[in-house]
Structures are given as structure tokens and as C-alpha cells.
Image (spheres, rainbow, N blue to C red):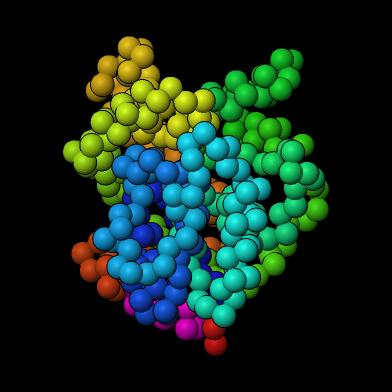
């Protein structure tokens, strides 16, 4: 059985994946584009070793920062694991929907030389600037995110219809918008308490030409602070704002791109959420 736990940042995906992995004797495969990279830990909310509870985790910390790890690379690595562990229950967990679609659907790339890029962490302004580099005479409004994405991706994949290659169950976790945003803001504050500023300062000092660092929320804002372009408080506020906007985009993507069954998270009694998901899985299997 293949189970995918999806949803916006800060909603409890990791907690659910650990609980279900114990109950299903499953392995866990990362589906977060930034948690692929080594040394990007606090800012990506990467699971800590002690939180893994002896459950095998794959595709975490597998790429150096200077590596341009793409959706194409993820597709190959994920499918190798799907084949290797085809007799095991497998849980994908993460918020990068394009990675899941590339791994589990007939998502075809024309060549290794032109792999698709995950643009989910890019702001509309960043997408627009990339599109202008591709076509200086671009006739797309800077805030039309969907058209910008189509334009940037149109040469990276074939026009074949996207159909599933695996029978997977897609579980989405959700919270009321105001509750989720409050959790995201609090999560950012916790990251700073855990050492995000120091982690970002060290990575900045490496002076790497790293696409992941320059696009990942939590790092790119602090890099602006280190350059003296904004204050630390402005960087914190920008991280919170972009994280909230990213969560909104994640909802939109999963609602339109994957057959997701959504569950409202019970923060006061998370075990109830686990039980509801388990019941749905049993019904789905039967």
C-alpha cells in the first residue's frame, strides 16, 4: 500500500506519518523539496533523528547544497525505492506536490538535460523575473501565477496526459485558516528559538551558488538581512508572510492536482485524527 500524507506547512503531517508508520509497519519517504538537502534543518522543519522513532526514513539529507537536485532526480530516486520496497507499506510525507506527481504519475521529461524545476517556493515576483529572463517581451501579468508557471514549465515536460502509475491513497490534513496561520507564525518564532538565525548565518557564510538556499523560505529572507537590505524584524515578518502564502498555494495545488481526502486536524486530541484516517484507509482498501 502507498499512502501519501499531504497538506500545508505546520499542519501535523510528520506526526501523523510516524503514528501510521508504526501501525502499518511502513517506511517513510520524504516529499519535501527542501528537506532533500543536507544542512538545511531548522528552516525546513526537518524531522530530528529522535523523532523518527526507529522508523526507516528515505530521501532526507541526500543532496549537497551545491547540487541542483530537481524533480527529475526525485522521480528516479523515489521510483527506485518504490520498486525496492514494493512488498512493504510506504508512506510519502511532505508538501511538495509536484514531487509526488512526478513519482506516482506518468510524469515524463523530454531529456535529462532539461529537468523540471519545483517552483513552489518562488514568490510571484520571483516567477515573473524568471519568465522575463526567458522572454523579455513577456505578456503575462506579474500576479498571474498560474500562467507564469505554465510558461516556465511548458518546455520541461511532454504534453502526455498525466495518469497515475500506482494505486495510492492521498490523505490531506487541514485546519481553519486563522488557526493554521497562527500556528505558522508560532512555528517561525520557535525556529528562531532553536537557532534558525545561526543556521542561516553559517550557510550564508559559505557563499554558495545554491538555488535551494536562494529560494527556500526562511533562508532567502535572512540572507537579505545579512546583506543589510532589511532589518531582522522585517525578515521575520517576511518569513511568516511568505509561509502563510505558501500554505495557501499548497491548498490550491493539492485540491486541483491530486485526489486528496481532507481531514480536519483535532489539535486537542490528535489521536482522534489518527483514528479517522485509519478508518478511511480501511474503507478505501475494502
Tell me what residue is drawn at x 58 percent, y 37 percent. 68
Residue furthest to the bottom: 286
Residue 24 quadrant? bottom left
Q: Would residue 258 be seen by someone viewing this image from the given angle? A: no
Tell me what residue is drawn at x 75 percent, y 47 percent. 109
Q: In this image, 253 relative to 182: left or right?
A: right
Q: Is residue 206 above or below residue 58?
A: above
Residue 105 in the image: state x and y as whole percent.
68, 60
Whether residue 263 is in magenta: the answer is no
- Magenta-colored span: 274-284
Q: In this image, 59 relative to 221: left or right?
A: right
Tell me what residue is drawn at x 23 percent, y 37 percent. 195
Q: Would residue 49 be seen by someone viewing this image from the given angle? A: yes
The N terminus, quarter of image: bottom right
Residue 108 in the image: state x and y as whole percent.
75, 52
Residue furthest to the left: 193
Question: Predominant secondary structure in magenta?
Answer: helix
The C terminus, quarter of image: bottom right
Whether residue 281 is in magenta: the answer is yes
Q: How many numbered discs, if any?
A: 0
Residue 122 in the image: state x and y as whole percent.
52, 32
Q: Is residue 129 above or below residue 178?
A: above
Tell me what residue is drawn at x 69 percent, y 41 percent. 115
Decide which of 270, 85 is in the foreground and name it: 85
Amino acid at each position: 500500500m502507498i499512502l501519501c500524507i499531504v497538506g500545508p506547512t505546520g499542519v501535523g503531517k510528520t506526526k501523523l506519518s510516524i503514528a501510521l508508520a508504526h501501525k502499518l509497519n511502513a517506511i517513510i519517504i520524504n516529499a519535501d523539496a527542501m528537506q532533500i538537502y543536507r544542512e538545511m534543518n531548522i528552516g525546513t522543519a526537518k524531522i530530528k533523528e529522535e523523532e523518527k522513532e526507529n522508523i526507516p526514513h528515505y530521501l532526507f539529507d541526500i543532496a549537497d547544497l551545491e547540487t541542483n537536485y530537481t524533480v527529475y532526480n526525485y522521480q528516479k530516486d523515489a521510483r527506485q525505492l518504490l520498486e525496492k520496497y514494493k512488498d512493504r507499506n510506504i508512506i510519502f510525507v511532505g508538501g511538495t506536490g509536484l514531487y509526488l506527481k512526478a513519482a506516482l504519475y506518468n510524469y515524463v521529461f523530454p531529456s535529462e538535460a532539461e529537468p523540471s524545476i519545483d517552483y513552489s517556493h518562488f514568490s510571484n515576483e520571483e516567477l515573473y523575473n524568471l519568465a522575463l529572463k526567458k522572454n523579455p517581451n513577456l505578456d503575462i501579468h506579474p500576479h498571474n501565477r498560474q500562467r507564469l508557471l505554465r510558461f516556465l514549465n511548458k518546455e520541461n515536460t511532454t504534453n502526455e496526459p498525466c495518469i497515475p502509475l500506482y494505486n495510492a491513497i492521498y490523505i490531506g490534513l487541514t485546519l481553519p485558516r486563522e488557526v493554521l496561520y497562527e500556528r505558522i507564525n508560532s512555528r517561525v518564532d520557535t525556529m528562531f528559538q532553536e537557532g534558525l538565525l545561526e543556521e542561516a548565518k553559517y550557510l550564508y557564510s559559505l557563499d554558495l551558488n545554491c538555488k535551494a538556499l536562494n529560494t527556500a523560505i526562511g533562508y532567502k529572507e535572512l540572507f537579505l538581512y545579512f546583506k543589510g537590505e532589511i532589518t531582522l524584524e522585517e525578515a521575520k515578518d517576511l518569513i511568516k508572510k511568505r509561509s502563510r502564502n505558501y500554505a495557501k498555494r499548497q491548498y490550491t495545488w493539492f485540491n486541483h492536482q491530486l485526489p486528496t481526502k481532507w481531514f480536519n486536524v483535532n489539535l486537542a486530541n490528535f489521536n482522534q485524527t489518527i483514528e479517522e484516517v485509519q478508518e478511511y484507509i480501511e474503507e478505501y482498501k475494502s
